[in-house]
Image: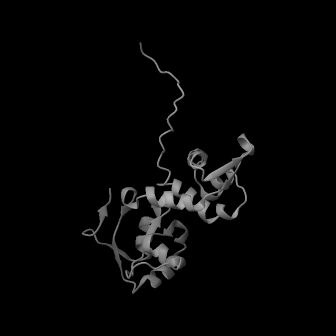
């Protein structure tokens, strides 16, 4: 006999990796903006992050089942509140691996230091296309954890890569460049 059966299982559903790719924009929003709000809606997060409604629903569903988000209301009137931000951050640290998800390119620039690069980036109006990443982000928030003087950027808009290479006179150094898997 062939067919599919819909049966309820006592086993919890397999948790999807909500700590990678675009879902990280949702998690970032929750920890930066959602933490200060008493309640927020799915649509509010969609509008402010630019992420699809389906992905926000998927992430929120996983976070509700883990007790990180709490819901009130039903259907389109449903509101959410962040109950356990520390647990969210800890889970994110435990599950997310930038090494598995990102292509990394290494460059050299004619600028003297990171500060000159950041000034040029702001003048170019491309700063909205990138976000500080790794050590650079840590240092920007006052938590310098290395003596490296590098600038790590995450491309929010991958189409801006060639423009950034021109504006910040970047020379690709292929020997150090790797696609991390």
Q: Residue at x 43, y 65 (%)?
A: 161
Determine whether, in the image, residue 20 is placed left or right of residue 32. left
| Up/down of 103 relative to 17, above or below | below
| Up/down of 134 relative to 21, above or below | below
Task: Find residue 134 and report its horizontal and vertical position in percent.
Answer: 44, 70
Q: Residue at x 57, y 56 (%)?
A: 26
Task: Find residue 108 and report its horizontal and vertical position in percent.
Answer: 34, 77
Q: Residue at x 51, y 82 (%)?
A: 119
Q: Quadrant of the C terminus?
A: bottom left
| Up/down of 181 relative to 64, above or below | below
Going by the picture, which residue comes out furthest to the bottom?
Answer: 112
Q: Nearer the viewer, residue 151 or 72?
A: 72
Task: Find residue 73 and report its horizontal and vertical position in percent.
Answer: 74, 44
Going by the picture, which residue comes out furthest to the left?
Answer: 175
Q: Residue at x 41, y 85 (%)?
A: 113
Q: Quadrant of the N terminus?
A: top left
């Amino acid at each position: 006999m062939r067919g599919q059966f819909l049966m309820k299982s006592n086993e919890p559903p397999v948790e999807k990796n909500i700590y990678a790719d675009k879902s990280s924009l949702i998690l970032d929003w929750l920890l930066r903006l959602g933490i200060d709000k008493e309640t927020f809606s799915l649509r509010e997060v969609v509008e402010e992050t630019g992420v699809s409604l389906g992905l926000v629903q998927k992430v929120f569903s996983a976070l509700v089942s883990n007790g990180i988000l709490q819901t009130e209301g039903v259907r389109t009137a449903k509101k959410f509140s962040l109950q356990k931000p520390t647990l969210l951050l800890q889970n994110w640290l435990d599950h997310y691996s930038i090494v598995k998800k990102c292509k990394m390119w290494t460059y050299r620039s004619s600028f003297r230091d990171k500060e000159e690069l950041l000034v040029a980036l702001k003048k170019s109006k491309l700063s909205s296309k990138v976000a500080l990443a790794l050590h650079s982000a840590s240092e920007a928030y006052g938590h310098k954890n290395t003596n490296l003087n590098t600038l790590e950027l995450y491309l929010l808009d991958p189409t801006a890569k060639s423009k950034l290479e021109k504006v910040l006179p970047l020379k690709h150094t292929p020997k150090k460049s790797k696609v991390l898997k």
